[in-house]
Amino acid sequence: MFRLIKQALYRARQFFQALSANLDEEDWQVLRENLNPEELAAFGRISAADQRHSLEVYYTLVREGKTHPDLLKAALLHDIGKGGGDIHLWHRVAIVLIRAFFPIALKWLAVPDGWRRPFYIHYYHPILGAEMAKRLGCSPLTVELILRHQPTLELPPWDPTPEQLELLKALQEVDGTK
C-alpha cells in the first residue's frame, strides 16, 4: 500500500513538473559542455518535460559522485528516442494509467503507424534512442546504457564488466525516481 501511495505521489509530481518544464542558462551551459552540436539537436527534439527530466537525472548522478563521461552523456540522451514522436501530455497520462492497471496493453498499443504511434515511440524509445546515439557517434558504452536504461524490453545479450553494470544500475535507479 505504501509503495502504491509513493508511486502515485511521484507520478503527480512528475505531471505538474511537466506542465512547467523549462531550462535556464545554467542548464544550457551543462548541455553545451557535454553534448556536441548534433547531440544537442537531438536533445532539442524531445519535449521540454523530457529535457527537464534528463537534466535532473544528470544533476542527481553528479551530486551522487557518479561522473563517468559515458554515464553522464547517457543521462542527457537516454530519452532522445522520444524525439518527434508526438507524445502529448494525455498520452503520458494514459501510459502511466495503463502501466499501473494493465501493463501488457502497452506492448499491444505499440504500433509504429496511425493513432498508436506515440505508444510505439514511448515503448521502444530505448531502442530508437540507442540507434540514434550510435548514428550520432556516441561511444559504444553510452549507446548500450541508453539501450538498456529501461529493463522492460527484451534485448540481445550483453556481457558487461562489473563497472559497466554499476553504471547501468545507477542510470536505471535515478531515471526511475526523477
Image (tube, helix red, strand yellow):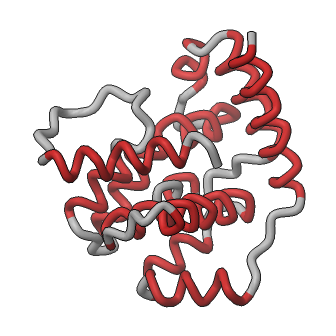
Name the residue located 40 percent from the left edge and 48 percent from the top edge. Answer: 170
Name the residue located 32 percent from the left edge and 26 percent from the top edge. Answer: 154
Q: Nearer the viewer, residue 113 or 93?
A: 93
**Does 113 appear above or below 65?**
above
Q: Nearer the viewer, residue 41 or 56?
A: 56
Q: Position of residue 121 (x, y in %)?
A: 55, 43
Asked where in the image residue 1 lies, by quadrant, the reply is top right
Q: Position of residue 112 (x, y in %)?
A: 52, 37
Name the residue located 76 percent from the left edge and 22 percent from the top edge. Answer: 97
Asked where in the image residue 92 lies, by quadrant, the reply is top right
In this rendering, position of residue 29 left or right of residue 157: right
**Does 137 appear above or below 51?**
below
Q: Position of residue 95 (x, y in %)?
A: 70, 29
Asked where in the image residue 21 lies, by quadrant, the reply is bottom right
Q: Nearer the viewer, residue 14 or 136?
A: 14
Q: Position of residue 31 (x, y in %)?
A: 54, 82
In this rendering, position of residue 143 left or right of residue 76: left
**Does 57 appear above or below 169?**
below
